[in-house]
Image (spheres, grey):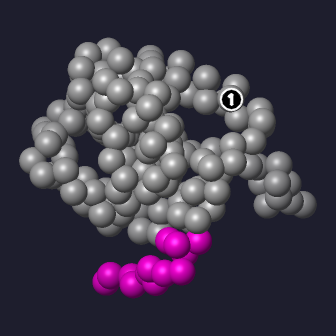
C-alpha cells in the first residue's frame, strides 16, 4: 500500500521559509550547534572521500569535511549563492532534495543533516538517492529535536 502525500502548498511554504532565513540571517545560538555538528561529522566521515549533502544551506558542514569531491544541494537559491561564494572548490546546485538528479554520480557518503523534518516523504527521498549510491555508500542522518517545547509529550504528565 502506498500512502499519497499532498505536495503543495507545504513545499512552497518550506521553500519560502528557508529563503527568508538565508536572505535575513539572525544572530542565534545555532552557531554552537553547527560547530558541534562539524565535529561529530568529522569523526564519522573521513577526509578525502566523495560526499553529497542534501539541504546543504551555506555549505559549511560539507566544506568542513574536506571531501575529495563534494556536492551540496538546497532549494534555497540564497543559500546556494552563499555556498558558492564561500566554498568555490565544491559544487553546489539549486535542487529539491525530493527530486535529486545527478546523473550517474555516486558518493561514498550522503548527508541529510537537519533535513528529515522538512521532507514530506522520506521514503521517496531515500529511494531517489539509489542512483547516487554504490555498494559501500553510507547514509548519515541527524535531526534536531525540541523535547522541551512540549514537556508533557516528551516526559509524560
Residue 46 in the image, given as x and y percentages of width and height? 33, 17
Residue 12 in the image, given as x and y percentages of width and height? 52, 72
Q: Residue at coordinates 27% horizontally, 57% vertically from top-left?
A: 100
Residue 33 in the image, given as x and y percentages of width and height? 66, 30
Identity of the residue furthest to the left in this view:
104
Q: Residue at coordinates 19% horizontally, 50% vertically from top-left?
A: 102
The residue indicated by pointer 1 is 31
Towards the viewer: 149 or 131: 131
Instruction: Report whether 86 appears left or right of 124.
Output: right
Towards the viewer: 61 or 46: 61
Q: Main secondary structure of the magenta part?
A: loop
Identify whether 20 is placed above or below 145: below
Q: Residue at coordinates 34% horizontally, 41% vertically from top-left?
A: 92
Q: Residues within 10 Å of mark 1 (few under 14, many from 20)?
A: few
Identify whether 94 is placed above or below 4: above
Identity of the residue furthest to the right in this view:
157
Q: Which residues are the magenta region?
A: 1-13
The answer to whether residue 61 is seen in the rendering is no
Instruction: Report whether 98 appears left or right of 20.
Output: left
Location of residue 89 (image quadrant): top left
Instruction: Report whether 122 appears left or right of 99.
Output: right
Identify whether 99 is placed above or below 151: below
Q: Residue at coordinates 61% horizontally, 30% vertically from top-left?
A: 34
Residue 125 in the image, given as x and y percentages of width and height? 34, 60
Instruction: Report whether 111 appears left or right of 134.
Output: right
Instruction: Name the image quarter holding the N terminus.
Output: bottom left
Badge 1 element: helix
Residue 3 part of the magenta-drawn span: yes
Amino acid at each position: 500500500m502506498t500512502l499519497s502525500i499532498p505536495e503543495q502548498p507545504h513545499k512552497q511554504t518550506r521553500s519560502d521559509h528557508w529563503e527568508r532565513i538565508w536572505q535575513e540571517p539572525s544572530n542565534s545560538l545555532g552557531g554552537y550547534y553547527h560547530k558541534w555538528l562539524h565535529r561529530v561529522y568529522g569523526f564519522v566521515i573521513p577526509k578525502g572521500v566523495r560526499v553529497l549533502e542534501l539541504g546543504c544551506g551555506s555549505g559549511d558542514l560539507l566544506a568542513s569535511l574536506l571531501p575529495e569531491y563534494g556536492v551540496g544541494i538546497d532549494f534555497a537559491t540564497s543559500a546556494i549563492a552563499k555556498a558558492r561564494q564561500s566554498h568555490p572548490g565544491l559544487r553546489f546546485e539549486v535542487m529539491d532534495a525530493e527530486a535529486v538528479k545527478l546523473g550517474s554520480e555516486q558518493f561514498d557518503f550522503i548527508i541529510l543533516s537537519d533535513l528529515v523534518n522538512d521532507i514530506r516523504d522520506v521514503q521517496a527521498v531515500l529511494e531517489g538517492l539509489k542512483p547516487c549510491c554504490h555498494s559501500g555508500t553510507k547514509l548519515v542522518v541527524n535531526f534536531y529535536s525540541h523535547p522541551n517545547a512540549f514537556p508533557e509529550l516528551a516526559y509524560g504528565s
